[in-house]
Image: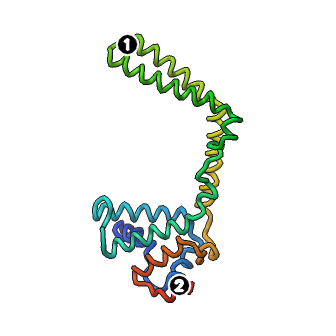
Amino acid sequence: MKSFSVYIEDRTTALVPTGGNLEDFLRSLEGKTIKGILDDSSFMSLYQMNKHGIGGQREGSDKDAMDFVNKLVRFVNRDIFKHRPKEREYETEEFKKENDYESYSKARSQKARLGMDRIKARRAGDDEFHQELQGKIDKVDEFLSDHPYIRGLRMIEKEYDKAVEDYHNTPLKADFLKDDGSERYDELVDAFTKLGGQSDSVIDV
């Protein structure tokens, strides 16, 4: 059984290459999941923050290692927006029109105004008016919580969450870990060379 200190050391170096070329290292990730890589990256980031303070080390081997891990995360997580697009379906004009976004927006504005009035009433010590406004806010909240736009938004977000979860938990395959000609891969190459990797062997991946 590993000691806690050894376990910590393993987690902080799990994504740092210890030899060979980039192709060797990426091949070693086959069968792992993006979630596992994200978790190890987060652990390493917290460890570096505790070791060097917020922002981590500004130069040196720890910084180079963290830079490599960040580039690795960007590379393996590159298809995330295929599963959770930057423009959500519920942000489109078509979806808003189909789900009465106008009444939803008006209710949101009404709630904001009532909220401001409630604050003023509380500051003025008018408890009765404060309670009256709270009742109106509760009714608006009830309307909003069951609004078609909100129901549709929740359903779509649930679908996005499931798609991202599946993406992050699917074992990585060799083809996905090869040079895809992207800028993210080039950044990974640069970060790898700063760790002492041989650029010729890396570029030929």
**Who's the residue at 60% across and 30% down the image?**
104
Which of the two discs, 2 and 1, labels the residue nearer the N terminus? 1
Mark 1 sits on what residue? 127
Name the residue furthest front: 93
Q: How far from the left and from the top, in percent, is residue 76?
A: 55, 68
The answer to whether 110 is drawn above or below residue 177 in the figure is: above
Residue 45 relative to residue 88: left or right: left
Q: Secondary structure at mark 1?
A: helix
Question: Which residue does the image show at 57% across and 65% down from the upper left?
Answer: 78
Crowd band around label 1 with a 10 angstrom C-alpha radius: few (<14), some (14–19), many (20+): few
Residue at the disc numbered 2: 203
Residue drawn at x 60%, y 55% is: 164
* Residue 1 can be seen, yes or no: no
Residue 83: % across, % down: 63, 56
Numbered circle sitting on residue 10: none
Q: Quadrant of residue 107?
A: top right
Helix, strand or loop at label 2? It is helix
The residue depicted at 61 percent of the width and 67 percent of the height is 171
- Say what amino acid the circle numbered 2 marks: Ile
